[in-house]
Image (cartoon, rainbow, N blue to C red):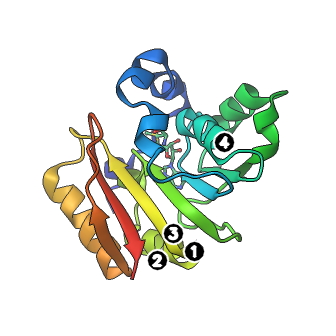
């Protein structure tokens, strides 16, 4: 297996994932507004330092939950520091997953996998596991970076997701991205 191909974004680069510049061209409210509603349970997979998690927590409101899941404890700690002492703390569950297992036990209404699927080695097992924890009417937003994920690699990810039981719903236009919305069945 070519480990380098699946290199995980280091914690030292967390600052480049959460800043004002990014918010300007990838506004979480604009991107997620059509899909994330009050009261939902949302899984932010590969949440990193929580650029999307914090806004999702605002969008789901007091009755909703965000499971912020990442492989790296350092990323979860950055997010923990950001929400400490705020009202959002109660809505965000920090979850450390394993390299080959998400291991979330709750049923979720929406899954966000932003700029992370190319870091997952076994995408087949990954999508099957997402299918097992997604609500029957739930949706998954997969977003990949435009340059180091080629058109061919993205199409391969989509093929794997489809063979794991997902159907393509739409291809939302998100700046600096290749993106798809998937549903089960
Ligand atoms: C490029 S960062 C993107 C972070 C965040 N989604 C964003 O857009 O700001 C990718 C993140 O995915 C995490 N990651 C990589 N493989 C993972 C896996 N198998 N399960 C969970 N998280 C993973 C990394 O630790 C890293 O924090």
Query: Closer to the N terminus: mark 1 or mark 4?
Result: 4
The residue that label 3 is drawn on is 138
In the rendering, at what x and y percent does residue 19 appear? 49, 19
Proximity of marks 3 and 1: CB atoms separated by less than 8 Å: yes
Does label 4 or label 3 sit earlier along the sequence? Answer: 4
Between 63 and 178, the residue placed more toward the observer is 63
Residue sitting at the far top: 20
Going 31% across and 67% down the picture, which residue do you hit?
169
Residue 77 position within the rendered picture, expressed as x and y whole percent measured from the top left: 71, 34
For the residue labelled by badge 4, is the local secondary structure a helix, a strand or a loop? helix
Within 8 Å: ligand 1 and the Cβ of disc 1? no
Q: Which residue is mark 2?
A: 128
Point out which mark residue 82 bears.
none
Which residue sits at x=22%, y=65%? 156
Judge whether 20 appears above or below 132 on screen: above
Q: Quadrant of the C terminus?
A: bottom left
Contact (Cβ within 8 Å) of mark 1 with mark 4: no
- Dot 3 or dot 2: first in sequence order is 2
Q: CA distance from mark 3 to mark 2?
A: 14 Å
Q: Residues within 10 Å of mark 1 (few under 14, many from 20)?
A: some
Cβ–Cβ under 8 Å for marks 2 and 1: no
* Earlier sequence position, callout 2 versus callout 1: 2
* Residue matched to label 4: 57
Q: Residue at x 31, y 81 (%)?
A: 163
Q: Is residue 91 left or right of residue 45?
A: right
Earlier-in-chain disc, 4 versus 2: 4
The relative height of residue 172 versus residue 13 in the rendered view (above or below) is below
Tell me the CA gap for discs 2 and 1.
13 Å
Q: Which residue is mark 1?
A: 135
141 on left or right of 132:
left
- Marks 3 and 1, how far apart at CA: 5 Å
């Amino acid at each position: 297996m070519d480990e380098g191909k699946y290199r995980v974004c280091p914690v030292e680069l967390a600052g480049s994932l959460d800043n004002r510049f990014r918010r300007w061209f990838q506004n979480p409210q604009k991107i997620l507004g059509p899909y994330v509603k009050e009261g939902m349970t949302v899984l932010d997979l590969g949440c990193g330092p929580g650029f999307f998690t914090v806004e999702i927590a605002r969008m789901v409101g007091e009755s909703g939950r965000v499971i912020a899941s990442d492989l790296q404890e350092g990323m979860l700690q950055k997010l923990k520091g950001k929400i400490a002492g705020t009202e959002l703390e109660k809505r965000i569950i920090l979850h450390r997953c394993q390299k080959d297992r998400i291991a979330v036990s709750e049923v979720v209404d929406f899954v966000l996998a932003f700029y992370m699927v190319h870091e997952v080695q076994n995408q087949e097992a990954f999508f099957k596991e997402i299918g097992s924890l997604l609500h029957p009417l739930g949706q998954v937003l997969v977003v990949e970076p435009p340059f180091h994920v080629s058109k061919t690699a993205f199409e391969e990810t989509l093929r794997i997701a489809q063979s794991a039981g997902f159907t393509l719903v739409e291809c939302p236009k998100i700046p600096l991205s290749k993106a798809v919305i998937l549903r089960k069945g």
